[in-house]
Amino acid sequence: ESGVTRPKGYNVSFHCNPEMEKYHFGQNHPMKPWRLALSKSLIYSYGMSFAMDNYISRTATYEELAGFHSTDYLDFLGTVLPEPVPRDLESQNPDLKFNLGGSDCPLFEGLYDYCSMSAGTAMDAARKICSNQSDIAIAWGGGLHHAKKAEASGFCYINDIVLAILQLLRFYPRVLYIDIDVHHGDGVEEAFFSTDRVMTVSFHKYDPHNFFPGTGALEDNGPKNEHNPGAHHAFNVPLNDGITDEQYKWLFDRVIGDIVAKFRPGAIALQCGADSLAGDRLGRFNLQVQGHGACVEFCKEKNIPMILFGGGGYTPRNVARAWTYETSIAIEYNKKIDPTLPQHAPWRDHFRHDTLFPTLEQTLGEPRQNRNPQKRLQEIVQHVTEQLRFVQA
Ligand code: ZLM
Ligand code: CA
Ligand code: ZN
């Protein structure tokens, strides 16, 4: 026996599709679906599966995907064949159809199936929340927040989060979306731009000309037109390189605490992109597994039904650590978890250090310089407070 027990009166479901782990974006592409296998392997090695309901999720149907995406786009996505675009030709061919086939969103073998699996995972999670069978539903294979109605963007083709939130809206009057991926959650923000039933909050590195996708300024709070119900229902927390656990936690607690108190969501959708961790191949922050997980813990303590999505995360060993720790938070095992990685964990050597919580020095050598003065963080909190005054209680 693993010694991991179920939390009393609290149900956690774990949704995955092991087929997803087998797809390949192409040589050297930062997005590596096998990080899902690594994460699941670590989660199961800790024995956490005994404390959750484990589901192999279905693939989403065409009709389900069409709940958000245009049929033109889906038809094309379903028929395109991988046709490698030579790197030097890509720049000469800027009008890729639906932004497909470039180096960010390549066409690869089985692309459509991969997308329907990610969406299926997220939608299954949403259904468990809607039917009250789960208090927390985990979908690490989802979280692809950049995809638009008729366009792929930033490694994302199908917006599984939007599809899941649309499900939640059938049962809950108000849904809060929170996004701790290092990139701006632009696709989700845009999808719910015109409704006051979804509030979106993204924390991200913001540098319009040098960091993808370049949107998500502090002042962008939804439609400027006051007659649009979505006005004031988008929140953005733009950050600079090197933010630390303490600062991030301070900000998160303030911002999310105030938003939850005012908006009173019936459900929370939390995108846990792990590229905000220190040492990520694409990230810029100094967050540790503990600081990233503290966001999940803070949300859990609100006792509101919640979906945990994956998202970015480009240093697979750190992705696996974060999502393992966050799974332990969901099942209330985090206080008891052994920080030493299980002896029998497959791929143990892959983790380099045999701890779930490597120090900044272990992950980075030299931590990134912190370019977030406390004064700026206070301004952010101040702005959020002011914007919240416009939100109907
Ligand atoms: N070039 N290969 C985050 C999505 C971030 C746009 C600049 C491509 C890369 C990146 C792809 C192997 C989420 C941009 C980048 C080079 C135009 C981005 C393929 C390295 C490689 O080595 C690479 C040949 C590739 C892509 C780096 N792309 C880094 N950053 C961003 C998209 C997705 O985490 O938020 C959610 C899952 N794209 O900066 C360029 C402007 C394409
Ligand atoms: Ca984000
Ligand atoms: Zn990201």
Image: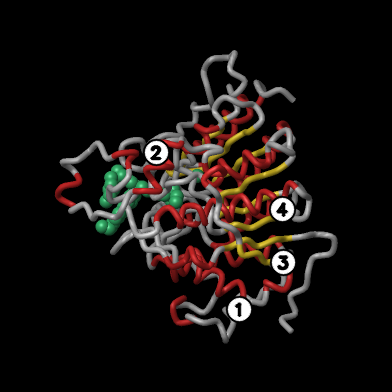
Q: Nearer the viewer, mark 3 or mark 1?
A: 3
Residue denoted by label 2:
151
Residue at 68% x, 72% y: name it: 49
Disc 4 + disc 1, Cβ < 8 Å: no
Mark 4: few/some/many CA within 10 Å (<14, 14-19, 20+):
many
Disc 3 + disc 4, Cβ < 8 Å: no
SS for dot 4:
helix
Q: Residue type at mark 4?
A: Lys
Mark 1: few/some/many CA within 10 Å (<14, 14-19, 20+):
some
Front-most of 143 and 163?
A: 163
Residue denoted by label 4:
128
Mark 3: few/some/many CA within 10 Å (<14, 14-19, 20+):
many
Which is more N-terminal, label 4 or label 3?
3
Q: CA distance from mark 3 to mark 1?
A: 14 Å
Front-most of 288 and 132?
A: 132
Q: CA distance from mark 2 to mark 3?
A: 35 Å
Q: Residue type at mark 2?
A: Glu
Residue 52 tag number: 3
Q: Residue type at mark 1?
A: Ser
Furthest toward the right, the residue is 9
Which is more N-terminal, label 1 or label 3?
1
Q: CA distance from mark 3 to mark 4?
A: 13 Å
SS for dot 2:
loop
Q: Position of residue 351 (x, y in %)?
A: 46, 76
Is 307 displayed left or right of 108 in the figure?
Answer: right
Residue at 68% x, 41% y: name it: 168
Residue at 39% x, 38% y: name it: 151
Which is more N-terminal, label 3 or label 2?
3
Disc 2 + disc 4, Cβ < 8 Å: no
Indicate if the residue with disc 3 has its beta carbon within 8 Å of ligand 1.
Answer: no
Which is more N-terminal, label 1 or label 4?
1
Q: Position of residue 330 (x, y in %)?
A: 69, 60
